[in-house]
């Protein structure tokens, strides 16, 4: 370590400024919320929990004004696709199966 440092050209502020289009904010978050986001990043083998929080907020804003029926239909379709991704067989009607 040096005995003296020259700060004559130093500037105040963040060492790593926020990228354009973003603003640094400081606010309190419940411990459980922060732990959940950090866990999600850890499970994904890396990333940035702050970026994940930003993504969650964007998704909330995008979906906030959607009609509840539309949301339920979307979720049901996703769940049905997830359960049987390769099933393309159609179910026969009762009339077709009766002799």
Image (spheres, rainbow, N blue to C red):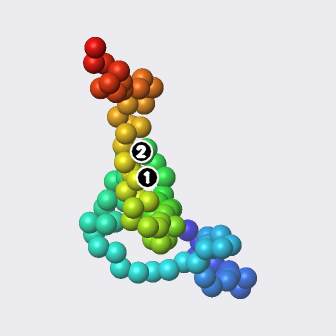
Location of residue 91 in the rendering, given as x and y in whole percent from the top left corner:
36, 26
Looking at the rendered structure, which numbered label has been put on residue 89?
A: none
Q: Which residue is mark 1?
A: 74
Q: Residue at x 47, y 67 (%)?
A: 66
Gap between marks 1 and 2 measured at Cα? 6 Å
Compared across the picture, whether 49 is left or right of 19 comes to left
Q: Nearer the viewer, residue 39 or 82?
A: 82
Q: Which residue is mark 2?
A: 78
Compared across the picture, whether 99 is left or right of 48 comes to left
Q: Residue at x 26, y 66 (%)?
A: 32
Q: Secondary structure at mark 2?
A: helix
Residue 15 is drawn in which quadrant?
A: bottom right
**Residue 30 appears in the figure:** yes
Q: Note whether 10 is above or below 98 in the view shown.
A: below
Dot 1 crowding, Cα within 10 Å, few <14, some 14–19, many 20+: few
Tell whether label 2 touches label 1 (CB within 8 Å).
yes
């Amino acid at each position: 370590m040096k005995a003296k440092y020259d700060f004559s050209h130093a500037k105040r502020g963040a060492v790593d400024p926020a990228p354009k289009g973003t603003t640094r904010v400081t606010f309190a978050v419940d411990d459980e919320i922060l732990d959940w986001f950090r866990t999600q990043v850890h499970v994904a083998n890396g990333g940035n929990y702050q970026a994940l929080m930003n993504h969650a907020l964007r998704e909330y804003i995008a979906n906030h004004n959607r009609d509840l029926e539309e949301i339920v239909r979307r979720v049901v379709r996703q769940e049905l696709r997830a359960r049987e991704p390769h099933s393309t067989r159609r179910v026969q009607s009762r009339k077709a199966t009766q002799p």
